[in-house]
Amino acid sequence: MSNSSTIDVRHPCPFIIGKSSAVVPTDTIIDDRGYTVARDWKTISISHIVEFVDLNEKDSGPKRKRA
C-alpha cells in the first residue's frame, strides 16, 4: 500500500471490487455448511495499491507489517 503497509492474502476468498475501493477479507472461517464467512475485513482505496507480489512462506526476509 502507499503507506508501506501490506495485506497478506493467504486463502482465496471473495473480494468486493468497486470503481475506487475494494473490500478485502482479513479473517475468515468455514461455517458448519462449508461456506467461507468473513469475520473481519478492510476497505482499501484502489489508488493506494502499489504492487501485488507472491508470498513465499519459506522466505526469511524482513517481516511484513500487517495492515
Image: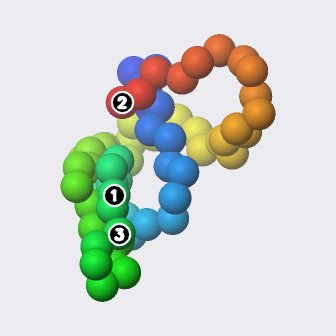
User: What's under tag 3, amino acid-wise?
Assistant: Ile
Q: Residue at x 47, y 31 (%)?
A: 6
The residue identified by callout 3 is 30
Query: Is 62 drawn above or below residue 36 in the view shown?
Result: above
Cβ atoms under marks 1 and 2 closer than 8 Å: no
C-alpha distance separating marks 3 and 2: 23 Å
Residue 66 image position (x, y, % from top left): 41, 27
Query: Does residue 63 lie above or below 37 as drawn?
Result: above
Residue 37's spot in the image, x, y percent?
Answer: 28, 67
Residue sitting farthest toward the front: 32
User: Which residue in the structure is indicated by mark 2?
Assistant: 67
Amino acid under disc 1: Thr
Contact between labelled residues 1 and 3, with CB atoms less than 8 Å apart: yes
Residue 8, numbered label: none
Q: CA distance from mark 1 to mark 2?
A: 16 Å
Q: Residue at x 65, y 15 (%)?
A: 62
Structural distance between the alpha carbons of marks 3 and 1: 7 Å
Question: Which residue is painted at 77% across and 33% down in the image?
Answer: 58
Q: Secondary structure at mark 2?
A: loop
Q: Is residue 27 above or below residue 56?
A: below
Crowding at mark 3 (Cα within 10 Å: few <14, some 14-19, many 20+)? few
Foreground residue among 19 and 38: 38
Q: Secondary structure at mark 1?
A: strand
Regarding residue 52, the answer to whether it shows in the image is yes
